Amino acid sequence: MTQSASTKAFSVIDQLSLVTSDGYRLAATRYSAQGPLKGNLIMAGATGVQQRFYRRFAQHASAQGFNVLTVDYRGIGESRPTSLKGFEMSYLDWGFRDLAAAVEFMDDGRTPLFWVGHSFGGHALGLLPNHHKITAAYCFGTGAGWAGWMPALEAFKVRLLWSCILPLIVAHKGYMAWSVLGMGDDLPLGVYKDWRRWCAYPHYFFDDPSMASVAHLYAEVRMPCIFANAVDDLWAPPVSRDAFIKGYRNAQLSARDLYPETKKQPIGHMGYFRASATEIWDEALNWFALQSNSAAMQHRSAQGGR
């Protein structure tokens, strides 16, 4: 790990280089907690969304007493190679290796470690080889990805993307040049292939015969988890969330439906982390604080019983 420190809006912000188990270097940013420390927190972002999108949330959480880490997955943002053409990786690398490295970095063995997931970030929780180090998780906009769970018009658009538009772009570029459509960061070919295949199933990779081993990984997750989805999230409406989170069958699981205040202020799939979402953030952070207090009480009880 290497780092350089700077100060912005009273928060200490460290630019980091995390090294994964297979030697890949990831660009990451650590925001230091202000005031009494309530916990360490990892912000696990969505597919094709750079870490800078979560900067406002990270600064808000750090002001509330959390050390926060954001990260660009391999192939994305500042962790992207010079060219994505010919760059080989699996979509699962983001969970198995990249976010696993984030957990190792943020876990100090003493402070509660929390997880905030956005879309893929809610998938990745079950892929982590070290999820047992996480105290609790709060995820937004996580769904199964299947167009059949989406409203009819959005389902038509998504099917058109997967069947016609994206295959043409990938054939021409050699990777998923999503930026051409203004829909996100460009994605490596391996991510495109995996994502397209899994989105064809109602329960995502849980229905993929080649992914049979993933079910037991998710069954091992036992921490408290909240999955919150907006009713106007066209890509991950609550019904899509419910189809996916069945995989977390042994977790202490709760689901929440979020409603936009007005039609002029939609939440959608990206609004969970826009500047107007501070009330949503505070609900999650306050819940983490409660989990931290509960963990501290359990620890003191265990110590007293020895």
Image (spheres, rainbow, N blue to C red):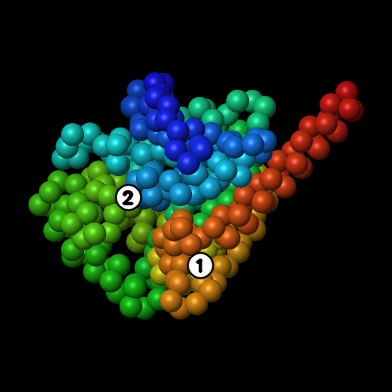
| Callout 1 touching callout 2 (CB < 8 Å) | no
SS at badge 1: strand
Q: Mark 1 and mark 2: span between their CA atoms?
A: 20 Å
Is residue 90 in sight in this rendering?
yes
> Which one is in front, 139 or 78?
78
Q: On the rendered structure, is 243 left or right of 197? A: right
Q: In which quarter of the image is the C terminus?
A: top right
Residue 229, position as x, y percentages in the image: 52, 63
Q: Quadrant of the N terminus?
A: top left
The amino acid at mark 1 is Ala
SS at badge 2: loop
x 36%, y 55%: residue: 198
> Which one is in front, 246 or 276?
276
Write down the residue under mark 2: 48
Above or below residue 179? Residue 2 is above
Quick one: label 1 or label 2, which is nearer the N terminus?
2
Is residue 99 in sight in this rendering?
no
The picture quadrant where one finds residue 302 is top right
The amino acid at mark 2 is Gly
x 51%, y 72%: residue: 260
Disc on res. 288: none
x 45%, y 78%: residue: 263
Residue 259, position as x, y percentages in the image: 54, 72
> Which one is in front, 209 or 216?
216
Write down the residue under mark 1: 230
Q: Dot 2: within a 10 Å radius of its alpha carbon, few (fewer than 14), some, or many (20 or more) residues?
A: many
x 76%, y 36%: residue: 296
Residue 267, position as x, y percentages in the image: 46, 67
Residue reaching furthest to the left: 172
Q: On the rendered structure, is 209 left or right of 181? A: right
Q: On the rendered structure, is 75 left or right of 151? A: left
